[in-house]
Image (cartoon, helix red, strand yellow):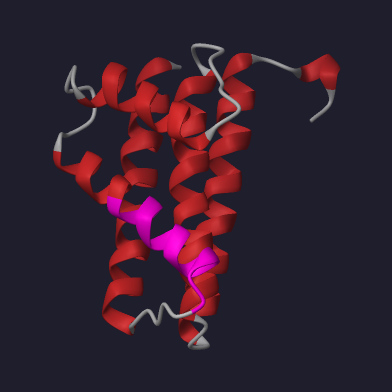
Amino acid sequence: MDRDEFTIEKFAKYRLERAKQDLSDAEFNYKNNRFLNANNRAYYSIFHAIRAVLALEQKDFKRHKDVLAYFNQHYIKTEIFPKNISRKISQAKSIREDSDYDDEYKPNAEETQNQIETARELISLVEKYLESKS
């Protein structure tokens, strides 16, 4: 991103576009039966969508768990985003970790499709949120 054109809103949109690209990568991997990779990309789609929201506050954290905890505390518990998405995000994180680090983990198509659906749902919610703030 060109520093001369930097605004908080543009940075948030940049992060949302990154989330959409990750979602596209997840869908590609899913279609090619690469469920481990699809789970990874779906989670990162979710993660970057959350960071798009945090960009409006100029908030960021080094650790994933801190990003997720802040989002839960300030956006889920306050019902800016629906409470049911919190469980889905937590599940996505757990499945991504299993996909990336557990050599014996074998994801199935349904589980991976659920990951992708969660990413789609969150991106849609974040898009609406960002539009309401611009």
Q: Which residues are magenta?
A: 91-103
Residue at left 19%, top 17%? 78
- In depth, the one of 81 and 74 nearer the eye is 74
Q: Position of residue 90 (x, y in %)?
A: 30, 46
Residue at left 63%, top 25%? 11
- In depth, the one of 112 and 123 nearer the eye is 112
| Lateral position of residue 71 relative to residue 59, left or right | left
Query: Magenta segment, principal secondary structure?
Result: helix
Q: Is residue 85 above or below residue 77?
A: below
Q: Is residue 86 above or below residue 134?
A: below
- In depth, the one of 46 and 126 nearer the eye is 46
Quadrant of the rendered structure where residue 55 is?
A: top right
Instruction: Please state, as top left, top right, bottom left or bottom right, where the N terminus lies in the image.
Output: top right
- In depth, the one of 97 and 21 nearer the eye is 97
Residue at left 34%, top 33%? 128
Instruction: Please state, as top left, top right, bottom left or bottom right, where the C terminus lies in the image.
Output: top left
Q: Is residue 39 above or below residue 4?
A: below
Is 44 a magenta residue?
no
| Lateral position of residue 2 relative to residue 89, left or right | right
Quadrant of the rendered structure where residue 85 is?
A: top left
Q: Position of residue 25 (x, y in %)?
A: 57, 67
Q: Position of residue 46 (x, y in %)?
A: 43, 47
Is 102 a magenta residue?
yes
